[in-house]
Image (spheres, grey):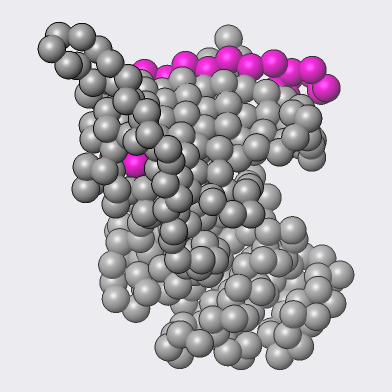
């Protein structure tokens, strides 16, 4: 167990993903340091099945007004994020809010400015930025392992589950946008998107988003819940080699391919060698995310997925959505 004896955390929302936050916190903290707030009384049994010593309440006000609680994790529906996060920070609490941080860029910017003015941590749950494989890719890019970064593409495909409150872009693509932003280290200069709504009117089931970055770096993101099989694949291409990251595989999740093209005596030739499997620490990303949040509070450091990063991701989603609606 990590030494976070000074951290008292409240988790707001104990639904499908919030429950994972509760389980994770239970593995990092003593149960007496954890409070769970859910508006449904049914969640009490869910929390008790994880650890009967965890505090449970249905009263959000009691959490906001509790001066012993210094950190809040928000895992409620996206449309509630802004209101809860704002109240929490105004009460002096550090906030980790699930993605998307809000649904409107202006609201995300307001939360960012509030966190800066109050010197509080505002972090968003882009959990893939705590995946050891993604961190290994970032290190490899910075160390020149694949040469000059040229192109990234990501497929996040599955059959269902259909959402009625958000389209496939908002449901799936924030993960990939956050990773591409992290790997490129810059903001796109052009955003294009198109898609199709087939099952419910006005809710796209499949979308393709194209991003153009400075230095001739391109990216595209293909998301769909109409796909016959599950695929979670990201390919990162440089002029000396390529990474393939497939988190849905049981083994060989991250591979390096020494493949590409080079100029020899004025002639472009292909080079093509067999792939190498890249090993990485098998640490749970959600646990790494919570540890990072708690450490940023204790050490007064800027979180990797801070409010600025979250706002940039949200702006890309917003422009892509405007493209779709045209």
Which of the 4 image quadrants contains residue 225? Answer: top right
Q: Is residue 156 left or right of residue 127?
A: right
Q: Residue at x 46, y 34 (%)?
A: 235
Q: Which of 321/145 is in front?
A: 145
User: Horizontal placement of 77 versus 277: left or right?
Assistant: right
Q: Nearer the viewer, residue 266 or 244?
A: 266
Up/down of 249 relative to 23, above or below: above
The span shown in magenta is: 180-204
Does the image show residue 326?
A: yes
User: Residue 128 or 163: which is nearer the viewer?
Assistant: 128
Compared to residue 115, the image places residue 236 above or below, namely above
Which residue: 17% across, 16% down?
Answer: 264
Residue drawn 63% across and 47% down? 248
| Residue 144 spot, x, y in % from top left | 22, 42
Q: Residue at x 29, y 76 (%)?
A: 299
Residue 184: % across, % down: 31, 37
Examine the rendered structure and indicate whether residue 171 appears above or below residue 248: above
Q: Quadrant of residue 265?
A: top left
Left or right, 14 with respect to 209, comes to right
User: Disc count in the image?
Assistant: 0
Q: Quadrant of residue 259?
A: top left
Residue 186 in the magenta stretch? The answer is yes
């Amino acid at each position: 167990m990590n030494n976070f004896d000074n951290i008292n955390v409240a988790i707001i929302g104990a639904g499908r993903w919030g429950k994972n936050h509760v389980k994770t916190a239970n593995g990092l903290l003593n149960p007496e340091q954890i409070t769970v707030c859910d508006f449904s009384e049914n969640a009490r049994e869910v929390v008790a099945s994880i650890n009967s010593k965890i505090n449970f309440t249905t009263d959000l006000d009691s959490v906001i007004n509790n001066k012993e609680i210094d950190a809040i994790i928000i895992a409620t529906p996206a449309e509630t994020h802004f209101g809860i996060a704002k109240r929490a920070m105004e009460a002096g609490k550090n906030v980790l809010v699930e993605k998307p941080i809000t649904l409107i860029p202006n609201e995300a910017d307001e939360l960012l400015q509030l966190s800066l003015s109050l010197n509080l941590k505002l972090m968003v749950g882009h959990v893939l930025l705590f995946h050891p494989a993604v961190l290994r890719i970032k290190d490899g890019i910075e160390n020149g392992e694949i040469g000059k970064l040229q192109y990234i593409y990501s497929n996040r495909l599955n059959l269902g589950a259909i959402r009625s409150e958000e389209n496939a872009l908002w449901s799936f693509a924030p993960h990939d946008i956050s990773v591409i932003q992290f790997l490129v280290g810059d903001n796109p200069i052009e955003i294009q998107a198109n898609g199709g709504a087939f099952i419910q009117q006005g809710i796209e089931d499949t979308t393709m988003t194209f991003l153009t970055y400075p230095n001739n770096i391109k990216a595209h993101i293909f998301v769909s819940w109409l796909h016959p099989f599950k695929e979670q694949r990201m390919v990162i291409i440089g002029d000396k080699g390529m990474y393939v990251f497939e988190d849905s595989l049981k083994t060989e999740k991250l591979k390096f391919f020494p493949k590409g093209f080079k100029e020899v005596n004025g002639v472009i030739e292909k080079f093509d060698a067999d792939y190498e499997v890249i090993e990485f620490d098998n640490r749970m990303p959600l646990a790494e995310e919570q540890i990072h949040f708690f450490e940023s509070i204790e050490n007064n450091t800027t979180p990797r997925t801070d409010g600025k990063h979250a706002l940039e991701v949200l702006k890309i989603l917003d422009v892509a959505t405007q493209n779709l609606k045209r």
